[in-house]
Image: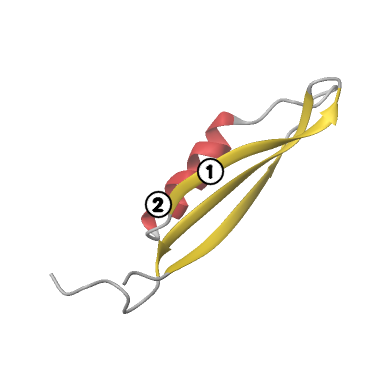
Amino acid sequence: MIKWEYQTLKMMTGGFLGGKLDEDDFEDELNRYGEEGWEVVSCFDTSYGQGTSREVIVVFKRPMDGSLPPA
């Protein structure tokens, strides 16, 4: 049976009213996690009010070492 480990990434939004995410930085972070074997499971924002986001949270998973069946 595959056992999973999980990791979260929190990206803060910016701008005068919030809600703006630097897409290049976000993509760079996703690629960095992907290179380490992490896979995105979920991505959601937290509401600051008035429909504005203050952060985006990404949940990743990857198999724990030694939990994959032999190929």
The crowd level at tag 1 (other Cα within 10 Å; few <14, some 14-19, many 20+) is few
Q: Nearer the viewer, residue 33 or 62?
A: 62
Q: Nearer the viewer, residue 38 or 5?
A: 5
Mark 1 lies on a secondary structure that is: strand
Q: Nearer the viewer, residue 68 or 17?
A: 68
Q: At 40% from the left edge and 72% from the top edge, which residue is drawn?
A: 64
Q: At 48% from the left edge and 47% from the top edge, which residue is drawn?
A: 41
Disc marking residue 34: 2
Q: Specify how the rendered protein is coloured.
A: secondary structure
Q: Is residue 52 above or below residue 35?
A: above
Q: CA distance from mark 1 to mark 2?
A: 14 Å
Q: At 45% from the left edge and 52% from the top edge, which residue is drawn?
A: 32
Q: Is residue 34 above or below residue 7?
A: above
Q: Amino acid at mark 2?
A: Gly
The crowd level at tag 2 (other Cα within 10 Å; few <14, some 14-19, many 20+) is some
Judged from this view, the residue extending furthest toward the bottom is: 66
Instruction: Identify the residue position indicated by label 1 in the image.
Output: 42
